[in-house]
Image (cartoon, grey):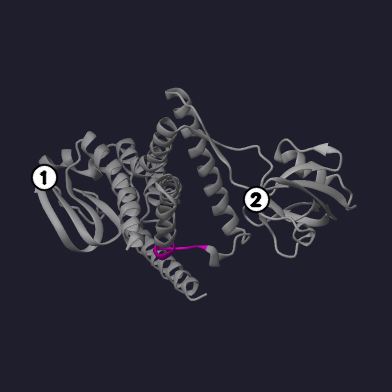
Amino acid sequence: MNTLLSFILVLGLLIFVHELGHFIFAKLFGVRVLKFSLGFGPKVFGRTIGETEYVVSAFPLGGFVKMFGENPDEQDISAEDRCVSFAHKATWQRFLIVLAGPVFNLLFAVVLFFLVFFFLGIPSAGEGTRIGTVSPGSPAAEAGMSPGDLILRIGDRETMVWQDVLDGVKNSGGQPITVVVQRGDENVSLTVRPAMDVVKNVFGEEVEQRYMIGIKKADEMIWEESTLLSSIDSALQQTWMYISLTAIGFVKIIQQVVPASEIGGPILIAQIAGEQMKAGWVNLIYFMGLLSVNLGLLNLLPIPVLDGGHLAFLSLEAVRRKPIGLRAQIVAQQIGIGLLGTLMVFVFYNDIVRLFK
């Protein structure tokens, strides 16, 4: 139940923010908005306020803002209605209306991180030397090291921060080293022989080889006091980091560095959202921020039907100084629908296979 609720909360809120961006800029430029819908399929709830029908539909896997005059095949628009028609607005106005959706998702990530940093403080990884995990069969495991051990010394050198641990192991040359750890109320001396191993980045690529013993640092988060300006700065940095990682991730998928089988869909999102909710609201907000960035960047891809496809057409229109032909727009939309449909089938397949592993 928690998984379903967290999924609806996360995805529904992100879709609402995205469509709100389109809605606000459409209204700003005087475009008549016919419908604001969260979800697809049968209408669950709906109410008309002014000229706009607000709808919540049965399947919360998307949403849309329907604007007057936005469809390529809408030809018979009267002269008096052209002032409220999307198609008859200036190219730069239509560009901003389309761009507003993805931009609102990116800004929403900044807002989420700002709220966490401003009210809880700015997190930073502790510099302690406590062991978080020990890989089975590793040199550390064979020597008797355990999660929770606090590394006090490697050889004759005291280890004040985790970098001291990494340096001590790396510089061992593969020779046995004496590691003193604090375990409970006593100090224990252990002999470990580091082994050459491969260091990988977050995308699974090999970045270097060095001597290692098979331990990872414990997650010790320190929340430092924040100000308004430091919270804004940290929120912008956090969002930019997620933007960079997401953009690089897209490239790595194309390069087949990241296997296509790793791509997930709604089922995976629901599972992760449920796990993050169990871990606490801060974890859920971080996940929501990451997903908001993903949604924003995904919609900027130049695929017809997505916002990025519309932006590409509008850019061509600005360069050519005339709209793209009606037939070309319709064909492009059909291709885009086919691509998205194929992608949805693929990610659902991955999700289902992952469930039975």
Q: Mark 1 = which residue?
A: 51
Q: Position of residue 124 (x, y in %)?
A: 56, 36
Look at 19% across and 43% down and name the residue there: 85
Residue 150 horizontal side relative to residue 326, left or right: right
Dot placed on the residue nearer the N-terminal end, 2 or 1: 1
The number of numbered badges drawn on the structure is 2
Q: Residue furthest front?
A: 185
Residue 22 occupies which quadrant of the picture?
A: top left
Q: Mark 2 = which residue?
A: 148
Span of residues in magenta: 263-268
Look at 14% across and 57% down and name the residue there: 45
In space, the residues marked 2 and 1 are separated at their CA atoms by 62 Å
| Label 2 SS | loop
Q: Does the segment drawn in magenta span residue 265?
A: yes
Residue 58 horizontal side relative to residue 210, left or right: left
Most foreground residue, 266 or 127: 127
Dot label at residue 113? none
Residue 19 horizontal side relative to residue 33, left or right: right
Most foreground residue, 132 or 343: 132
Q: Position of residue 144 (x, y in %)?
A: 76, 58
Q: Is residue 29 visible?
A: no
Q: Is residue 324 visible?
A: yes
Mark 1 closeness class: few <14, some 14–19, many ≥20 residues within 10 Å:
few
Please say if 117 is above or below 282: above
